[in-house]
Image: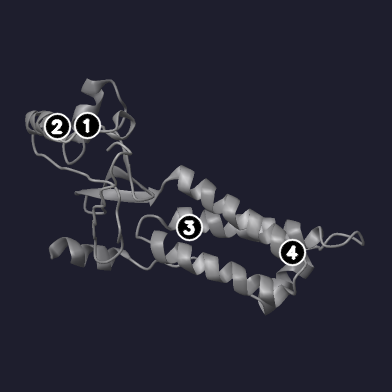
């Protein structure tokens, strides 16, 4: 929607996504989606509002999207971004359709930039203080993005933090580099928070049943 008014939608999935600011409407048929979009535009127009073109898309998604993708000139179905996640069509181990979630690339880069800045500011503090601050941020990231199917993304962030933290420790002094052997001993004494799934497959399946 336009910036003239702020409308907050609250979309919840088992308490994982409070305070959503995007609205996703799902339809079985394309004609229904087009008709609803036209009705919504007219309705908003009565209040001098309009849909934001850059944030309004019609995406073919669901069980038959993979089958129809070649007809649309694509190798795979389109994806959509919602609340920091990229949603895509995939299948479970039984071959049935399911919605896959992975961290949106821009959000992952933003998290890396935030942690890089944090490590630069903390590099001259005692090691224990550095780890406590880093783990606080990592726990928050895992709590939000730690969803089944997204482990690779949270693991990517963890590995990035390890490499960049080592780089910052090496820059603390001109006396020399912190060897990887020494760095591993530091990690053993002051471990970084390991990646964790707060919503494993079993929990998501239970939500789907409900």
For marks 4 and 3, give the one nearer the viewer: 4
Q: CA distance from mark 3 to mark 2?
A: 36 Å
Q: CA distance from mark 4 to mark 3?
A: 23 Å
Q: Are marks 1 and 4 in contact (CB under 8 Å)?
A: no
Q: Is residue 114 above or below residue 195?
A: above
Instruction: Please give the residue where the numbered disc 2 appears in the rendered image.
Output: 37
Instruction: Please give the residue where the numbered disc 1 appears in the rendered image.
Output: 58
Looking at the image, is mark 3 or mark 2 earlier in the sequence? Answer: 2
Q: Are marks 3 and 1 in contact (CB under 8 Å)?
A: no
For marks 2 and 1, give the one nearer the viewer: 2
Q: Are marks 3 and 2 in contact (CB under 8 Å)?
A: no
Looking at the image, is mark 2 or mark 1 earlier in the sequence? Answer: 2
Looking at the image, is mark 1 or mark 4 earlier in the sequence? Answer: 1
Image quarter in which the C terminus is found: bottom left
Q: Which mark is residue 154?
A: 3
Give the crowd class for mark 4: few <14, some 14-19, many >=20 residues within 10 Å. Answer: some
Residue shown at 30%/25% (left/top)?
74
Q: Are marks 2 and 1 in contact (CB under 8 Å)?
A: yes
For marks 3 and 1, give the one nearer the viewer: 1
Instruction: Please give the residue where the numbered disc 4 appears in the rendered image.
Output: 123
* Residue 12 visible (yes or no): yes
Where on the picture, by quarter, is residue 1? Answer: top left
Looking at the image, is mark 2 or mark 4 earlier in the sequence? Answer: 2
Where on the picture, by quarter, is residue 61? Answer: top left
Answer left or right for 113 relative to 91.
right
* Residue 192 visible (yes or no): no
Q: Is residue 89 above or below residue 116?
A: above
Residue shown at 30%/58% (left/top)?
19
């Amino acid at each position: 929607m336009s910036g003239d008014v702020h409308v907050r939608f609250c979309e919840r999935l088992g308490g994982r996504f409070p305070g959503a600011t995007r609205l996703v409407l799902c339809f079985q048929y394309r004609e229904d989606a087009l008709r609803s979009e036209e009705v919504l535009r007219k309705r908003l127009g009565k209040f001098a509002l309009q849909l934001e073109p850059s944030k309004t898309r019609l995406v073919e998604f669901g069980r038959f999207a993979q089958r129809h993708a070649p007809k649309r000139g694509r190798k795979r179905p389109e994806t959509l971004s919602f609340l920091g996640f990229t949603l895509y069509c995939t299948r479970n181990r039984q071959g049935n359709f399911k919605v896959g979630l992975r961290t949106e690339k821009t959000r992952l880069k933003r998290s890396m930039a935030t942690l890089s800045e944090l490590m630069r500011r903390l590099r001259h503090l005692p090691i224990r203080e550095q780890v406590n601050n880093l783990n606080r941020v990592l726990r928050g990231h895992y709590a939000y993005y730690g969803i089944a199917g997204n482990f690779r993304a949270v693991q990517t962030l963890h590995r990035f933090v390890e490499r960049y933290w080592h780089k910052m420790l090496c820059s603390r002094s001109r006396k020399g580099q912190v060897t990887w052997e020494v760095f591993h001993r530091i990690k053993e004494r002051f471990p970084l928070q390991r990646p964790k799934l707060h919503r494993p497959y079993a929990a998501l399946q239970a939500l789907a049943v409900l």
